[in-house]
Image: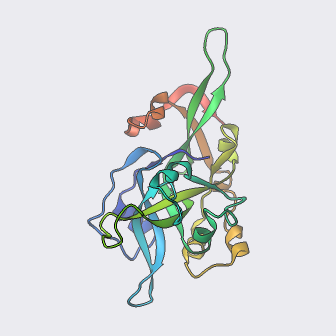
Amino acid sequence: MCGRYVSTRRPQDLVDLFDVTRWDFDQTLEPSWNVAPTDDVWSVLERVERDTGEVTRQLQPLRWGLVPSWAKSLSIGAKMINARVETVAEKPAYRRAFAKRRCLLPADGFYEWQAVAATKTAKARKQPYLIAPGDGQVMALAGLYEFWRDPAVSESDDSGAWWSTCTIITTEATDAAGRVHPRMPLAIAPDDWSAWLDPTHEDADELRALLAAPAAGHLDARAVSTAVNDVRNNGPHLLDEIAGDHAD
């Protein structure tokens, strides 16, 4: 799974990198070295403009943890931060979004935890690792998004009624990530960004073909401090490697 990741790029940089054509400059998110479920995160998506019919590529904040349109409560999102690639096109919670509402979630890397067995002098524990591209490039994580209206809000009042949420698609782990945890987030290759984001592209088989193994052998993993375990901790110090531990 993917339960934490790193997202520190400025929105202006993401606009340039992903060829975004629409972004509300009033929308800002702080850099985060410890993105956690239910946080707002940057997403790149394409929408059809109602007035012109034009498809525009947008940079939008979404709440991490997908809430299906039929859900009764926003709280379900905390349990739906990941969607398995093997079943994403068929599961009721994700299939509509897979067909029409796909996005990219920019990340500098992600965290996974490896179980460490107990010894005579130490208890069993879980060691966090940062897994990231060795070349420092942004990972465009494959995501889905949904719109949910809070049924507790009056039909005559749309203020605060609508939520935009997302999930990250995961696959079997490869590269250094596979030595830490059996699952990992999927990244979309730059050449496939347009095909993945296109809201008119609904061929399930063609879309599945875009979900290939990420990074193709270019991911590194390094042990980091257990400070990342606490969502209240944030800052670049969370990326510092612990001497003596390295998954290579």
Q: Residue at x 58, y 29 (%)?
A: 127
- Viewer-side residue, 88 vs 193: 88
Q: Residue at x 33, y 51 (%)?
A: 30
Q: Which residue sits furthest left? A: 26
64 relative to 222, above or below: below
Q: Residue at x 63, y 32 (%)?
A: 114
- Residue 44 position in % (x across, y down): 46, 67
Place residue 204 in its image quadrant.
bottom right
- Residue 59 position in % (x across, y down): 40, 68
- Viewer-side residue, 29 vs 241: 29
- Residue 146 position in % (x across, y down): 50, 66
171 relative to 88, above or below: above
- State the scheme by which the image is colored: rainbow
Question: Which quarter of the image is occupied by the C terminus?
Answer: top right
Q: Which residue sits furthest top? A: 120
- Viewer-side residue, 11 vs 208: 208
- Viewer-side residue, 131 vs 88: 88
Relative to 108, is 237 on the left or the right?
left
Place residue 153 in its image quadrant.
bottom left
Relative to 209, is 166 on the left or the right?
left
Count how many numbered circles sit on residues in the image. 0
173 relative to 46, above or below: above
- Residue 188 position in % (x across, y down): 60, 63
